[in-house]
């Protein structure tokens, strides 16, 4: 394998100074038994609040040893006994590997879950308890989250049974397919941390064994730089993080001889990252769209004049910076922050970027500005970079950009005053197109996350640093959340289309028109009012009522009616629920989840009941998987034979967390990458620090 050695580049110092105690852990168990994160569990949210506003969050722990060195802590005797045991286990693992490499895994899929879920799905006929706009206090959220776990088990077991090891899963054909010859572990690695979070220990073990035995990156194939970073690198890093920092989740004993090395996920992550680095070797430092895994050569996009998507090129920092933290390799840090510097040097008005960028020059291509496809996660990573490492420069960029979004991209529908996040397809001087990709629905939750830093709104509002501007951001987040929810309720299946258009006035109403006394209009930030700001939009009830005013504001074009089981709306619901504490968001999520179960399930008939006893009133079918839809606006929906990896990595994870306690994988301690892989927030030190300043600004 020939990989360019980036380590020798003098511009990117890699040595760790002795004062950087990366390897010193602070693993004293916290009050919740999850280990210490440098956060005082008992200090409560007030402490966290102060930390957020002062940027004084403390260091995370990582490891108590040099990286990659195996840890063996047990006494000798135990080791010898374990050696014999190890031989037996190795033989069993080899046998398992042999069988699992063949078309069908030895895993017995939990078909009872599929039957149960099918029976339950039959009861979802509209007569079951549905949300009527009034949040109920007597809901058993735990049993609802178990339903999500069941849906995950069915999805995973189906994949395991019919497509084990393949990157793509086509559940109707019951087949898998690889994206590159030997496969990349696309489904397995992306879903791994969800299984940890759901405490699915034996499935995690199976996945881990596969990663150990079968996952090889030394393949002569081109892969998408961004997708590989967010899904594979992000998935491995998150698996490393959860397995080392949340030992109670899907525990696996590191000391068992015969089990894969304890640093398996980190080793794989570092191997993959080294290969991805070649993508950044352009003249400007903006990564190429693709990279060859074996040679590490960056490859420009074959379309768009060789330009990379802006979102793709700029959504790499959380992953590489966390890896820099874990390994002490400052090179990873420098390379990805350089991307931010190049983008910022273009001085795009109000922080709004066109959706293509040339790796050779660092200049943008075209003028199309949107927070949907090709634009989305650039904006997401502005605030998340700040939350991950407390670097003020990114908060500054986020604040400027959010003001730009409010000034140039926000408008309201004609009838119900739904808030719309539009597009500027011909630049800021051109008209606003009232179109929202489902992808853009990450924004409401991200705005709320940026406003409070992840702590509850009720606590954030007590801070002396809370102002009217932040109240307005929360209002915007609530309004956009409602719009995203409306795109679900608007279709016959209750599942949103890929793209929605809205009816608006000409000229369009801006946020300044709608709220002439806002800080945006006056330029004066004031002290916040004690009450939350009221919303201007109409309520979206009763559910599904076609005569409702807001329905007249929504247009779905024939070519946009597909639903790929995307996560963005439930992702935002999770943030909105955790931050505002408003149960409405959980109720909306539950309605959405039921629609997914009802309409995206792939079922198979059970014939054995008929054979045994025709009177048997047991289930007549079972759910074996879930799949994308080609048309979500017709009953029955038209199914498309593909289960995207983000269904298990993101959508189901966010549903599960939405119905969990708000402290579980808390927003105060973690930051989720754009593929829903949680990573710790940490305070960088030594060589890991902001290495650039904004032009004309001293940061
Ligand atoms: C995911 O892969 C990521 O969330 C990405 O940033 C955008 N799209 C998909 C899911 O819709």
Image (cartoon, helix red, strand yellow):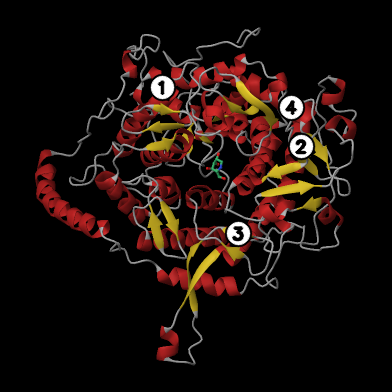
* Residue 255 relative to residue 349: left or right: left
Pointer 1 residue: 332
Q: Residue at x 78, y 52 (%)?
A: 555
- Looking at marks 1 and 4 on the same chain, the residue that comes earlier in the sequence is marked by 1
Residue 538 at what x, y percent from top left? 85, 50
Q: Secondary structure at mark 3?
A: strand
Ligand 1 shown in quarter: top right
Residue 29 at what x, y percent from top left? 40, 36
| Residue 630: mark | 3
The crowd level at tag 2 (other Cα within 10 Å; few <14, some 14-19, many 20+) is many
Residue 578 at what x, y percent from top left? 63, 43
- Looking at marks 2 and 1 on the same chain, the residue that comes earlier in the sequence is marked by 1
Pointer 2 residue: 476
| Residue 307 seen in this snapshot | no
Give the CA distance from mark 3 to mark 4: 32 Å
When the figure is inspected, residue 327 is found, relative to residue 570, above or below; the finding is above
The mark closer to the camera, 1 or 3, is: 3
Q: Secondary structure at mark 4?
A: loop
Give the CA distance from mark 1 to mark 3: 40 Å
Q: Residue at x 69, y 30 (%)?
A: 369
């Amino acid at each position: 394998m020939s990989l360019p050695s980036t380590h020798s580049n003098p511009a990117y110092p890699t040595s760790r100074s002795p004062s950087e105690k990366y390897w010193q852990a602070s693993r004293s168990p916290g009050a919740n038994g999850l280990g210490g994160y440098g956060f005082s569990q008992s200090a409560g949210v007030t402490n966290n609040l102060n930390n957020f506003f002062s940027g004084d969050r403390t260091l995370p722990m990582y490891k108590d040893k040099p990286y990659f060195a195996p840890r063996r802590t047990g006494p000798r005797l135990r080791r010898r006994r374990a050696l014999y045991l190890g031989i037996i286990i190795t033989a069993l693992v080899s046998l398992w590997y042999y069988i699992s490499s063949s078309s069908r895994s030895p895993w017995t899929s939990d078909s009872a879950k599929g039957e149960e879920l099918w029976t339950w799905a039959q009861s979802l006929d509209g007569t079951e308890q549905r949300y009527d706009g009034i949040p109920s206090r007597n809901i058993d959220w735990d049993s609802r989250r178990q339903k999500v776990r069941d849906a995950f088990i069915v999805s995973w077991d189906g994949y395991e049974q019919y497509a084990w090891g393949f990157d793509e899963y086509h559940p109707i054909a019951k087949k898998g397919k690889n994206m590159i010859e030997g496969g990349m572990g696309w489904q397995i690695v992306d879903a791994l941390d969800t299984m940890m979070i759901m405490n699915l220990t034996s499935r995690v073990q199976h996945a881990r064994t596969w990663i150990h035995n079968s996952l090889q990156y030394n393949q002569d194939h081109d892969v998408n730089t961004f997708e590989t970073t967010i899904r594979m690198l992000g998935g491995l890093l998150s698996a490393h993080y959860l397995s080392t920092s949340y030992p109670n989740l899907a525990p696996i004993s590191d000391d068992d001889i015969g089990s894969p090395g304890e640093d398996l996920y980190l080793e794989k992550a570092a191997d993959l990252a080294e290969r991805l680095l070649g993508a950044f070797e352009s003249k400007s430092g903006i990564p190429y769209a693709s990279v060859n895994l074996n040679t590490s050569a960056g490859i420009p996009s074959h379309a768009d004049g060789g330009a990379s998507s802006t979102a793709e090129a700029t959504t790499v920092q959380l992953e590489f910076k966390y890896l820099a933290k874990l390994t002490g390799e400052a090179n990873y840090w420098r390379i990805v922050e350089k991307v931010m510097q190049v983008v910022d040097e273009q001085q795009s008005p109000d922080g709004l970027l066109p959706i293509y960028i040339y790796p050779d020059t660092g200049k943008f291509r075209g003028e199309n500005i949107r927070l949907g496809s090709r634009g989305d996660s650039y904006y997401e990573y502005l605030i998340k970079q700040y939350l991950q490492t407390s670097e003020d420069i990114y908060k500054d960029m986020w604040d400027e950009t959010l003001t730009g979004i409010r000034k140039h991209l926000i408008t309201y529908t004609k009838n119900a005053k739904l808030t719309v996040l539009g597009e500027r397809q011909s630049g800021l001087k051109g008209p606003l197109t009232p179109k929202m990709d489902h992808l853009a629905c990450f924004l409401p939750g991200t705005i709320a996350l940026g406003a409070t830093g992840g702590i509850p709104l009720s606590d954030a509002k007590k801070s002396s640093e809370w102002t009217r501007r932040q109240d307005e951001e929360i209002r915007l987040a609530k309004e956009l959340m409602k719009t995203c929810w409306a795109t679900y309720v608007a279709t016959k299946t209750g599942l949103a289309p890929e793209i929605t258009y809205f009816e608006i006035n000409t000229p369009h109403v801006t946020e300044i028109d709608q709220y002439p006394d806002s800080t945006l209009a006056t330029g004066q930030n004031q002290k916040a009012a004690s009450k939350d700001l009221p919303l201007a939009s109409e309520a979206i009830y009763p559910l599904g009522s076609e005569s409702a005013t807001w329905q007249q504001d929504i247009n779905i074009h024939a070519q946009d009616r597909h639903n790929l089981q995307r996560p963005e709306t439930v992702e935002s619901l999770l943030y909105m629920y955790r931050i505002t504490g408003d149960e409405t968001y959980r109720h909306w999520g539950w309605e959405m989840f039921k629609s997914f179960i009802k309409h995206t399930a792939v079922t198979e008939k059970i014939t054995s009941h008929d054979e045994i006893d025709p009177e048997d009133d047991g289930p007549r079918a079972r759910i074996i998987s879930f799949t994308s839809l080609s048309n979500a606006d017709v009953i029955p929906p038209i199914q498309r034979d593909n289960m995207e990896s983000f269904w298990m990595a993101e959508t189901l994870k966010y549903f599960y967390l939405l119905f969990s306690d708000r402290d579980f994988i808390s927003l105060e301690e973690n930051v989720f990458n754009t593929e829903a892989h949680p990573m710790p927030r940490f305070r960088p030190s030594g060589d890991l620090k902001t290495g650039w300043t904004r032009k004309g600004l001293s940061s």
